[in-house]
Image (cartoon, rainbow, N blue to C red):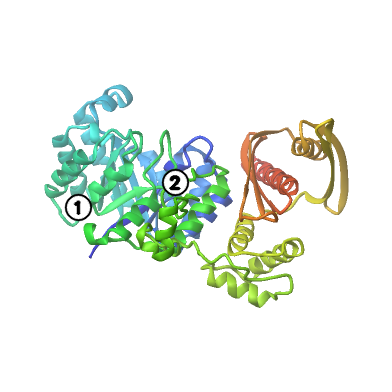
């Protein structure tokens, strides 16, 4: 069966989208999860865009154990050199070059002729090859480019040493039929058929998945995608949708990937936790309604045989149907660690100890601890950060006839600080009290709350996004009390902002 390679660009193309930015520690954490997921190539960033992106790309290259690590660069020698410095320590480095090839891009963006683009690309691919054995060359806006020019350009890039060539449907303009025809034409006429052929598709017209699958059907060897389909404008093609389409319809596509599908759900969940942007309930594969059935006819069919209305099993992507009570307040750490392993998580002993402490606190307040509760507790630890401020206590006074008042007590370096504030509601008042304690100019951009499980004692997950000292950070809090969860999410965001401020000061001192 033919193997299709997965290049994940969540940390580059996905992270460029407004509201999806991640700091370095979050990027490294996400890269490690992508490595566990089994992606073949991780695109770590655009190192020349900023010193922060350069450092993050370098850290990812050092952290990833199995996947190849690439970073994208314009066809500019100085950019290529900078990009190579960022990824050269990776176990499997790849240089990824791109240049625009459509008439509208060459004229209005590059101010270059077709021949200038041709010669620039050839020269830069040759230079990249002198630095790195694995070179990918991409044609930006390829689907609006002259196909004869694309073929000539790709063959020249291959002659100069490119090992992968990629067409980008940069603005999501193509249709599935057009993609199939273009891929078939280019791939069948490459001067070296052993070179990998790749596609990078955007979703502006909602045809990203269809276009990518059409490309695979036409012979594409590699697809470039993002977790949850995040990306600029309408986003990129979603990794989980492509992988599960190939997995579910192996009979038709006769293709497979190296993805461990049981890691899909927790990968998608980790990303939403990091960026604070939830998924639509009807999101294919990982939306909360993806395996839910309300129609009586559907429910009856599923009860008789799940295959009547479910073409995939929840277990295939790491969602367990069984939401039974698995542990309680009298459970020990060994039983807890065993259940973590059963759920498919790999954690250090230190991380297990920290998660177990969170579990014991929750078990004192919640009668039934489900698998989803366990996953939420584990997820909280995945994004743990040093607690500059920790919550000691809070008191809320709120009602329809009075102004909400919050008294919040925090601890920093063993010293307790308390403040009181009024607000539009208990959460607003709590956040204002915290602001008075930490004395940081934080602006709340977004706040969301959702129940992790069902029932009156459901564990609540609060996510807040703040802008503080020029950084946009996301905080997360868990509790069966929604006010406490919200307060913890805000404190978590503040602690991240403090850590980033300290990092900025350290870097400034080093530069001076």
Q: Residue at x 71, y 47 (%)?
A: 482
Q: Quadrant of the N terminus?
A: bottom left
Q: Residue at x 51, y 38 (%)?
A: 50
Q: Which residue position holds label 2?
A: 283
As drawn, 124 above or below 106: below
Q: Tell me the element at label 1.
A: loop
Q: Mark 2 or mark 1, which has the lower sequence index? A: 1
Return the x and y of residue 56 as percentages of the image width and height: 52, 48
Q: Quadrant of the C terminus?
A: top right
Q: Which residue position holds label 1?
A: 219
Q: Is residue 204 left or right of residue 157?
A: right
Q: Residue at x 74, y 74 (%)?
A: 330
Q: Tell me the element at label 2.
A: loop
Return the x and y of residue 509 as percentages of the image width and height: 67, 42
Return the x and y of residue 435 as percentages of the image width and height: 78, 37
For marks 2 and 1, give the CA distance: 27 Å
């Amino acid at each position: 069966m033919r193997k299709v390679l997965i290049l994940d660009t969540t940390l580059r193309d996905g992270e460029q989208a407004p509201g999806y930015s991640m700091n370095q520690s979050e990027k490294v954490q996400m890269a490690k999860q992508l490595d566990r997921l089994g992606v073949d190539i991780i695109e770590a960033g655009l190192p020349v865009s900023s010193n922060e992106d350069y450092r993050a790309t370098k850290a990812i290259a050092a952290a990833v154990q199995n996947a190849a690590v690439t970073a994208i660069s314009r066809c500019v020698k100085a950019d290529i050199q900078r990009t190579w410095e960022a990824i050269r320590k990776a176990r499997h480095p790849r240089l990824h070059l791109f240049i625009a090839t459509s008439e509208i891009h060459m004229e209005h963006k590059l101010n270059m002729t077709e021949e200038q683009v041709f010669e620039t690309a050839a020269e830069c691919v040759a230079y990249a090859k002198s630095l790195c054995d694995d070179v990918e060359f991409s044609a930006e806006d390829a689907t609006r480019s002259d196909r004869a020019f694309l073929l000539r350009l790709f063959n020249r890039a291959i002659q100069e040493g490119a090992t992968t060539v990629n067409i980008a449907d940069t603005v999501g303009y193509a249709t599935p039929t057009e993609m199939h025809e273009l891929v078939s034409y280019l791939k069948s006429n490459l001067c070296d058929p052993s070179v990998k052929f790749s596609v990078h598709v955007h979703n502006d017209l909602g045809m990203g998945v269809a276009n990518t699958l059409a490309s695979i059907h036409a012979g594409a060897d590699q697809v470039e995608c993002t977790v949850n389909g995040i990306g600029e404008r309408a986003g990129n093609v979603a990794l989980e949708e492509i992988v599960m389409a190939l997995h579910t319809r192996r009979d038709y596509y006769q293709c497979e990937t190296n993805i461990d599908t049981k890691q899909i759900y927790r990968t998608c969940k980790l990303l939403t936790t990091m960026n604070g942007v939830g998924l639509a309930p009807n999101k294919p594969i990982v939306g909360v309604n993806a395996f839910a059935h309300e129609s009586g006819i559907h429910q009856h069919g599923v009860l008789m045989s799940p295959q009547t209305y479910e073409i995939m099993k929840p277990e295939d992507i790491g969602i367990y149907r069984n939401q039974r009570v698995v542990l309680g307040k009298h459970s020990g750490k060994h039983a807890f660690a065993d259940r973590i392993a059963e759920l498919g998580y790999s954690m250090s002993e230190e991380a297990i100890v920290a998660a177990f402490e969170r579990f014991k606190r929750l078990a004192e307040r919640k009668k039934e601890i489900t698998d989803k509760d366990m996953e939420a507790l584990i997820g909280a630890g995945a994004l743990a950060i040093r607690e500059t401020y920790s919550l000691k206590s809070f008191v809320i006074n709120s009602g329809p006839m009075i102004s909400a008042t919050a008294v919040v007590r925090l601890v920093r370096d063993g010293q307790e600080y308390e403040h009181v504030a009024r607000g539009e509601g208990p959460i607003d008042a709590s956040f204002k009290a915290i602001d008075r304690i930490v004395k940081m100019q934080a602006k709340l951009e977004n706040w969301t709350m959702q129940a992790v499980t069902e029932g009156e004692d459901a564990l609540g997950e609060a996510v807040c996004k703040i802008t503080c000292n020029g950084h946009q950070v996301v905080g997360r809090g868990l509790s069966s009390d929604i006010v406490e969860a919200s307060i913890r999410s805000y404190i978590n965001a503040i602690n991240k902002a403090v850590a980033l401020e300290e990092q900025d000061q350290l870097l400034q001192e080093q530069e001076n």
